[in-house]
Image: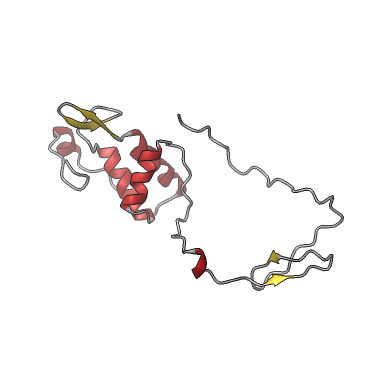
């Protein structure tokens, strides 16, 4: 059975499809990533089955996760790459914006700071920040979200 086809499973016919939220939140996207990765296909002699619950692939949660990620802006290739990656905690940016090729990006002006540090790129309309009397060592950004271990 393909992803877009209607399931013949009696449970699916009774319960129907899981609805996609009207407005997506970052939590919806995180749950959708987990749904497509954890409920991926596993080959069996009778055909592909859901790796998590043994239902016919794609199960209800896998289909819901795909629909949410498509509504979020990912295409089929990107969703398949998430499934192949196998990490249910991989981060998908919110809001998701398609990246342009580097040659299509507008170049930002390079400014010379008063301390003689050339080559810093500054966005238009923003003043370059001058840090008072630093040692020149790089400073790590503050941790804003937990770093999940990689799935093996």
Residue furthest front as drawn: 103
Asked if residue 129 is positioned above or below residue 45 in the image, the reply reads below
Residue 131 location (% of width, % of height): 81, 58
Quadrant for residue 58, please give it: top left
Asked if residue 46 is positioned above or below residue 145 in the image, the reply reads above
Q: Nearer the viewer, residue 125 or 151?
A: 151
Residue 52 location (% of width, % of height): 30, 28
Residue furthest right as drawn: 133
Quadrant for residue 50, please give it: top left
Residue 124 location (% of width, % of height): 64, 72
User: Is residue 32 visible to the viewer in this orientation of the structure?
Assistant: no
Q: Nearer the viewer, residue 58 or 117?
A: 117
Quadrant (top left, top right, bottom left, bottom right) of the N terminus? top left
Q: Does residue 33 appear to the left or right of 143 in the view shown?
A: left
User: Is residue 65 visible to the viewer in this orientation of the structure?
Assistant: yes
Residue at image location 45% in from the left, 29% down from the top: 152
Residue at image location 20% in from the left, 38% down from the top: 15
Asked if residue 112 is positioned above or below residue 42 in the image, the reply reads below
Residue 105 location (% of width, % of height): 53, 68
The colouring scheme, among rainbow, by chain, secondary structure or one colour, is secondary structure
Q: Nearer the viewer, residue 135 or 119?
A: 119
Count of number-bearing discs: 0
Asked if residue 51 is positioned above or below residue 32 in the image, the reply reads above
Q: Does residue 120 appear to the left or right of 82 in the view shown?
A: right
Residue at image location 35% in from the left, 40% down from the top: 83
Q: Nearer the viewer, residue 63 or 82?
A: 82
């Amino acid at each position: 059975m393909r992803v877009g086809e209607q399931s013949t499973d009696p449970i699916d016919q009774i319960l129907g499809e899981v609805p996609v939220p009207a407005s997506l939140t970052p939590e919806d996207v995180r749950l959708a990533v987990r749904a497509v990765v954890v409920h991926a296909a596993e080959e069996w002699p009778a055909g592909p089955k859901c790796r998590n619950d043994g239902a016919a692939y794609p199960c209800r949660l896998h289909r819901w996760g795909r629909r949410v990620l498509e509504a979020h802006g990912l295409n089929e290739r990107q969703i398949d790459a998430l499934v192949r990656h196998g990490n249910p905690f991989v981060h998908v940016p919110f809001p998701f914006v398609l990246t342009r090729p580097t040659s299509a990006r507008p170049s930002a002006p390079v400014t010379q700071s008063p301390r003689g540090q050339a080559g810093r790129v500054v966005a238009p309309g923003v003043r370059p920040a001058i840090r008072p009397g630093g040692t020149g060592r790089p400073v790590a950004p503050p941790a804003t979200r937990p770093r999940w271990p990689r799935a093996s």
